Amino acid sequence: MDRRQFTKVAAAAGTVTALSPLNIARAQGARLKVGVLLPRSGVQAGIGQDCHRVIDVTAGILRDIGLPALDIMNADTESNVDVARSRAERLISEGAQLLVGAFDSGQSTAIAQVAEQRGIPFVINIAAAPPITEQGYKFVFRNFPTAPMILGDAFANQLEVFQATGVSPKSAVFMHVNDTFGQAMQKGFTGVMSNFTMPYKVLQTISYDPAARDLSVEVAKARASGAEALIMVSRLNDAILITRELIKQRWTPAAILSMGPGWYEDQYRKTLAKLGDGPMSFVPWYDPNKKLSKQLEAAHTKAFPDIDLNTNHIYTFEALLVAADAFKRAGSANPKALADAIRTTNIRDNVSTGPGIQFDAKGQNDKLRNSVVQNRGGKLLTVAPKGAANAKPELPMTAYDKR
Amino acid sequence: MIARLLEGVPRRGLAALGALLLLLLVFPAFASGYLLSVGFLILHFAFVGQAWNIMMGFAGQLSLGHSLYVGLGAYAAAALYVHFGISPWIGLGASVGVAMIAGAVLGFLAFRFGVAGVYFAILTIAFAEFARIGFDHFSWVQGSSGFFLPVANYTTNDLWNLRGSPKMFYYLMLAMSVAAFVACHALLRSRMGYYWQAIRESPEAAQALGVNVFRYKMAAVVISAAMTSLAGVVFAFYYNNLFPEQIFHISRSIELILGPIIGGIGTLVGPLVGALLLTGLAEGMREAMLQLGVEVPGVKQVFYGICLLLVVMFLPHGVWPPLARHLGLERGAGRREER
């Protein structure tokens, strides 16, 4: 060995020795690598980006409650099932030890298959199609209510609201947007409603195209039916269109009961101001009285003062909460150990409405409850269920021309 | 038969195709799960691009609603499997049949009543939209709630029921792409292929020469529909869930025609080159940006747009014809050489 070779070997040995303590430190404090798959471009871009907002806020909260920090690896599913699958593969290839996502049922199903094949736990933030957790998967967990759960809770909460306000409409019109979500809700509506003794009779069911730019005929039909309440399954644009038509046609139903997005969203309230007050939304929501909810709300308001906390934020946050909690209890990033830890999750101090986060044998959190949020004074108030409310419900709605 | 197929194909071209096939065959041995899924997507787009090319590239009929056949094929085979346990290999008979009937109805309405050009393209979109709305209400396949195939973590590959690993699907798609390539090559060299090209260049002149324009246009639509439906069958069993909103959507139709447009409409290699360029380069570019610490959602769509713009501006016949000339693979490559 000559002098040059000796110098090279010595330098290499020195470098390895110098870096070794760092390696040990990294192994000891290694973070869990979480692949977050969201539709941040394509037709669902707005929702995906909304879900993504909460990720930055999450790090501080996890630290505050003594949970380990997570290494977030982002992936855009482009609102496309093909891309969702390949992105999941890519994240796993790059070392993701747990996956979170993906807002949409189709994309979540595609990711679930990859997760199951590769033995990597997958925590679904938002996706309501029941079959996802009925496939016998061992690595797939969902902390979001299925469509039948959402509907069942909506009727139970309606009864509570009617009792609390003393206003029980005797008739209603059911209007729904004719897209995937609207159709699914419409199908379940009659079946699930028969399990409850509702005070109203549905006089008419009116569906409309999601791309409709004029809903005057539909609203006129609903008004002509003489119904006291309007039950809605809609999106944002049509919720605004329908409200404008209600005002134009001088019809204020005693109650507007929405079982989907649109009526509680920031844009709806900002666009309509005081004319947006009154509607109630029966949605997967958060319990404002829980300690963690207050923490999340405060952190979120600080980071995004113009955006209210909503379903997208809540369930994305909770998916990451499940991941961090499981990592802490498993004491390892081994996927099997993580999956076992998630299976025994029992988080009482959470954010969403209900007793907490637990998964059944199928990987579904079947303890989740929905809330009722009412638009009042430009704000969102949680009015039911009683134990998870910060205000009392108010019915009937104030007439649009009296505001 | 093989000698006839190979007639006139330059040796260099054959060698290049052989090398490419060999590369694709050994690819799974070295590829990670992610690369394998990208490989599957490239082959999928190459296959459906080839199928679309029959209609537009060979016969000159612009279809912007090819998602119709993908969806029909997918739903027919998946429904037969879920409801009756019928193997997708038997079910694909139904898939092809349904797609052929849909193509025949569309073709008959268009060609019998002289609907051509952009109006024909609009008609194809309309059919795909009818299907989307119809399937949204088709309760036998769960309508808009989504149709889910039962899945499990398969330890062995069950080719008969198309239940297995991504590797199995990759090889299946590779076999289908090779078969489609050979079939299209044979079709292009057949009497029908020459008639199609004559119709593409001038339907009036072709008719004046005695070509039954209606019959051969119908044949193009029906064959293209049948081939596209096969891709739908594989799609259904690979992803295991079907939503009318996704599978019949016009964005899927646009996605599957981008490959042949960029690769070279009317060429045999164009759809493969286009799929490789679009999917491969888009993924590569995204990967490079990530390495640089730049994460921009939607960058792929911007890349697609730029590619399309550049091709339209500088390579109106697509990437493959000038590339083939440059590589000395002209015969059998460019649309001009096929005339």
Image: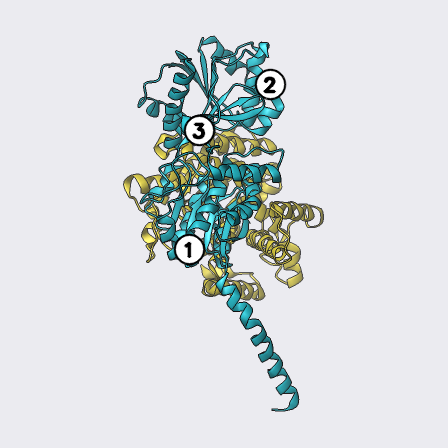
Chain colours: A cyan, B yellow
Residue located 40% across and 17% down the image: A162
Q: Which residue is mark 2?
A: A274
Rendering coords of residue A90 (x, y %):
50, 55
Q: Are marks 1 and 3 on the same chain?
A: no
Residue furthest to the left in view is B84
Rounded to the nearest angstrom, the CA distance separating label 3 from label 2 is 22 Å
Viewer-side residue, B301 vs A242: A242
Residue beneath disc 1: B166
Tag 2: Cα neighbours inside 10 Å, few (<14), some, or many (≥20)? some
Label located before the other in sequence (3 or 2): 2
Residue at which label 3 appears: A371
Residue B187 visible? The answer is no
* Alpha carbons under labels 1 and 3: distance apart: 41 Å
Q: Amino acid at mark 3?
A: Ser
Crowding around mark 1 (Cα neighbors within 10 Å: few <14, some 14 to 19, many 20+) is some
Residue A169 lies, in percent from the top left, at 41, 12
- Which residue occupies 55% across, 14% down? A246
Q: Chain of mark 3?
A: A
Q: Chain of mark 1?
A: B
Q: Are marks 3 and 2 on the same chain?
A: yes
Q: From the viewer's side, name the closer residue of A43 and A73.
A: A73
Q: Secondary structure at mark 3?
A: strand
Residue type for callout 1: Pro
Does the image show residue B312?
yes
User: In which quadrant of the rendered image does the N terminus of chain B lie?
Assistant: bottom left
Which of discs 1 and 2 lies nearer the camera? The answer is 2
Measured from the top left, where is residue A140 in percent x and y?
Answer: 39, 47
